Amino acid sequence: MIPRLNRSDSGQAFPIYITVVAGLLFLAFAYLAVGQAATNRNGAQTAADAAVLAAAQETRDQLAGEWAENVENPASWQEIFDGVVPGLDDTCWRADQLAALNDAQIDACALDGPLGYRVEVTVDEPVGDSIVPGTESKYARASAIAVIEPSCAFELPEGDTEADVLPKLTCKDQDWELDPEDLSELPEPQDLFDVHLAD
């Protein structure tokens, strides 16, 4: 004999079913909100990283230009490699460009020591509507620091540093024998300096 379901039992199970489904939907929307926030945060960090690297690379190029202009004066090389060069142009405009390409804007951009930059950005688009109140007006922010590191080593010759012989320059395991009579081939900025995000 097949047992019959008690109508009162099935009626009691329905509210439990509705509660479980509502709980699962709430969890799904909560995970979606967390995912939205994480995506926005990742976008902000990408924009900050790109912006700070652009500013630092522009400064690196200026330092490399200074070195090339003073290549026949080895006494000045170390200061250039240390970033102690007066009159360099502000390169935060490059940070602005890269932030804009990544749908963000610069909140702050400044030197972080003679060989580094720090930027802070805010993304252009808010997190958006979600089950978390107030997210529609929240904007992800991020910051990043880039470091410019000299990649070359050299030893000054004794006596007159503006003599006919220039020091051998070793950059990233490559030796550069510099001839004052023929300076048509010089290291590139990326040979002279390494630019990377700070850990």
Image: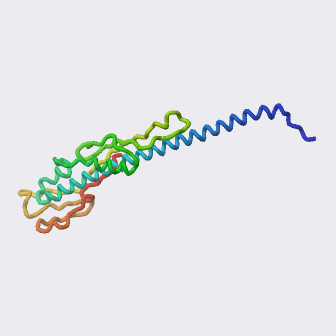
Q: Is residue 69 among the parts visible in the rendering?
A: yes
Residue 18 quadrant = top right
Residue 188 quadrant = bottom left
Residue farthest right in this picture: 1
Seen in the picture, residue 95 relative to 166 is either above or below; the reply is above
Q: Residue at x 7, y 61 (%)?
A: 163
Q: Position of residue 115 (x, y in %)?
A: 25, 47
Seen in the picture, residue 146 relative to 24 is either above or below; the reply is below
Seen in the picture, residue 133 relative to 167 is either above or below; the reply is above
* Residue 90 left/right relative to 142: left
Q: Position of residue 5 (x, y in %)?
A: 86, 36
Q: Residue at x 22, y 64 (%)?
A: 175
How was the colour assigned to the protein in this rendering? rainbow
Q: Is residue 52 among the parts visible in the rendering?
A: no
Q: Residue at x 15, y 58 (%)?
A: 69
* Residue 9 left/right relative to 199: right
Q: Position of residue 184 (x, y in %)?
A: 17, 67
Q: Residue at x 17, y 62 (%)?
A: 168
In this rendering, the count of numbered labels is 0
- Image quadrant occupied by the N terminus: top right
